Amino acid sequence: MTYQTDCTLPEEILEQIAEQGLDYVPELIRIIVDNAMLLERQKRVNAAPFERSPDRRGHANGFKPKTVATRVGKITFAVPQVREGNFYPQALEKGLRSERALKLALAEMYVQGVSTRKVAAITEQLCGFEVSSTQVSQAAAELDEQLQAWRERPLGRCPYLYLDAHYEKVRQDGQVRDAAVLKAVGVNAEGKREVLGVSVALGEHEVHWRTFMQSLVARGLCGVILIISDAHQGLKQARRAVFGGVPWQRCQFHLQQNAQAYVPRQSMKAEVGGDLRAIFNAASRQDAERLLAQLVEKYQQRAARLAAWMEENIPEGLTVFSFPAAHQRRLRTSNGLERLTREIRRRSRVAALFPNEASCLRLMTAVLMEISEEWQTGRVYLRLDTD
């Protein structure tokens, strides 16, 4: 079998997409993954194709086909081989890890008899008719070992720590429950974002958050100088117990949303929103506190509950002013985790309902692991040497 190993030019790819639309997506994925695997082999042997080099550590030995069923159809990849053996490119596994987790979630629903007709149809397309509980268990055990190793990997210094949770539908004891997916993202010593951990629990109670945070510390998380999150009561209590001496920045976006519950009239909401933005966009904490005092006085008569709420809660969103100006825009909110959640839900909405907590944790971990790996190879998020 002959494989095309040179990367198609971007202009040609765009032309193919324009002509074939979504039908070209499988071929585009094949091109990208095949070329990523080629680069891995080149790094492994420490030599370009046909290059004579005294530093060569191995020899290319052709390709082997591997056909994988994905949501966009079956794709046959050309897996590069090395004559000396003991080489398998990670590009293919990284690109398909969340696909495997999703297929397992659907297959588990299928074999447990709790799948909808939609799930059964998708499972049939992705996994074929021969889906048994034994096959599912074996595949799950293999993937779970890899994902658990990532969840338990050692951590290091992360000056900035973001915490957030979202909910997924999970079946437990015959009932559909809302399971909280707890997530931690840090900005590491190199200034890059990194998903530090993920956990699935039936709720955001203090004990769940505390156990999750303690696991991060036990894995070596250190050097945290600021925590950014919303004001969920369970999270707040756990943060005080585990990171009691670390300053806290309450997400300004959530603060603005919370404030609307205290606005007595619909006609005032835009005005209140503008006033709060003026505080958060102030040049310094001193200016922000001056504006806050003016707002409390302004709304004392028109909206007494709002004024009292502002006086008590808005200062929790001003901690960021104590940190470098170049960092403040990234530290004001936990909106980066909101975007992370949207990406997770884009992948998980196919399943809609997970058959158990383990299945939910498997897909959450797979997706977050892929995103974190992309962050680590991408650009710097914050320059930590900024004064």
Image: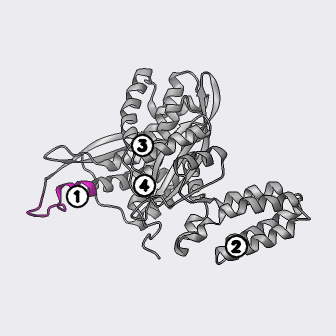
Query: Disc 4 vs disc 1: which is toward the camera?
Result: 4
State yes or no: discs 4 and 2 in contact (Cβ < 8 Å): no
Q: CA distance from mark 3 to mark 1?
A: 27 Å
State yes or no: discs 3 and 2 in contact (Cβ < 8 Å): no
The image quarter containing residue 317 is bottom right
State yes or no: discs 2 and 1 in contact (Cβ < 8 Å): no
Residue tagged 2: 288
State yes or no: discs 4 and 1 in contact (Cβ < 8 Å): no
Foreground pick, 98 / 237: 237
Q: CA distance from mark 4 to mark 3?
A: 17 Å
Q: Label 1: how many residues lie within 10 Å, few (<14), some (14-19) or many (20+)?
A: few
User: Which residue type does callout 3 highlight?
Assistant: Arg
Residue at x 14%, y 64% (from the top left corner) = 51
User: Which residue type does callout 1 highlight?
Assistant: Lys
Q: Which is more N-terminal, label 3 or label 4?
A: 3
Residue tagged 4: 222
